[in-house]
Image (cartoon, rainbow, N blue to C red):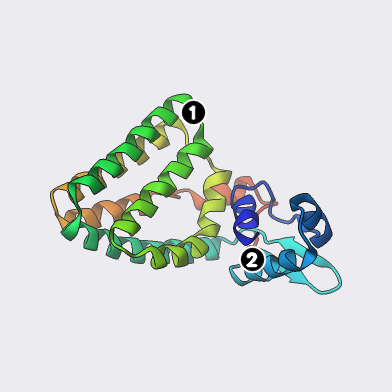
């Protein structure tokens, strides 16, 4: 329930500012109101909804401050993860990562950019699993929900997708040569350019943002 609602909010199926009804959500999913209520509480804990007594539960507006904080946390964790991976990555791990990049190339041709973002997520999840830091990814997943909302709001162009693919390939190349310093730099560069126009995105969608 929590993951289903979180994904709907992140992918903007539930838009910032939307009112969420326990009864309506429970009916749509086919469950009682109690698990919906519990999911709302968890979503409030990670800043995706705000529960207002006597008024209802609302999807939060996107906070540029929260996005910047999440980006800082993500970079700190993922740079540490990729450095560890560079020291013990296997040939099979590299093959798995290369396959994900090839899938991204195909999706880029078809211009299915929501799917492209999902494959990008899978790429980063795979790296965290190689490091055996899946628990760290769960922490990251909640933290970066604000980042992901901006990414789905501002889906990549072909040029942006080409850059992402190139950066992913640079990370894999560094891992394949067991070069932790190079891998760390490649990951930091990639994450720092992930959302490089936050102010202009917010200005283009003032109804969806608020601090």
Residue 200 pos. (x, y %): 54, 47
Mark identifier at residue 43: 2
Can I make out residue 206 in this image?
A: yes
Residue 159 position by quadrant = top left
Is 180 drawn above or below residue 159 in the view shown?
below
Q: Residue furthest front?
A: 31
Q: Residue furthest right?
A: 54
Q: Residues within 10 Å of mark 1 (few under 14, many from 20)?
A: some
Going from N to C along the chain, the mark reached first, 1 or 2, is 2
Mark identifier at residue 111: 1
Is 24 drawn above or below residue 154 in the view shown?
below
- Left or right of 13 in this view: 152: left
Viewer-nearest residue: 46 or 29: 29
Query: What's the residue at 30%, 44% (across, down)?
Result: 97
Can I make out residue 200 in this image?
A: no
Residue 160 position by quadrant = top left
Residue 29 pos. (x, y %): 74, 52
- Left or right of 52 in this view: 188: left
Residue 198 pos. (x, y %): 51, 52
Residue 57 pos. (x, y %): 76, 65
């Amino acid at each position: 329930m929590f993951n289903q609602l979180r994904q709907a909010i992140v992918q903007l199926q539930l838009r910032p500012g939307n009112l969420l009804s326990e009864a309506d959500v429970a009916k749509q999913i086919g469950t009682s109101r109690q698990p919906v209520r519990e999911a709302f509480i968890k979503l409030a804990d990670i800043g995706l909804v705000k529960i207002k007594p006597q008024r209802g539960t609302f999807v939060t507006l996107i906070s540029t401050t929260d996005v910047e904080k999440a980006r800082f946390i993500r970079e700190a964790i993922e740079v540490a993860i990729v450095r560890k991976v560079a020291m013990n990555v296997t040939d099979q791990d590299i093959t798995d990562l290369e396959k994900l990049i090839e899938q991204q190339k195909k999706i880029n041709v078809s211009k299915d950019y929501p799917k492209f973002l999902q494959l990008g997520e899978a790429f980063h999840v795979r790296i965290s699993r190689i490091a055996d830091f899946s628990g760290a990814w769960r922490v990251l997943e909640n933290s970066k929900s604000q980042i992901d909302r901006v990414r789905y709001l501002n889906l990549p162009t072909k040029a942006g997708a080409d850059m992402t693919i190139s950066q992913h390939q640079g990370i894999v190349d560094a891992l394949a040569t067991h070069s932790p310093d190079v891998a760390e730099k490649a990951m930091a560069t990639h994450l720092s350019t992930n959302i490089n126009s936050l102010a202009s995105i917010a200005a283009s969608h003032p109804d969806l943002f608020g601090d």
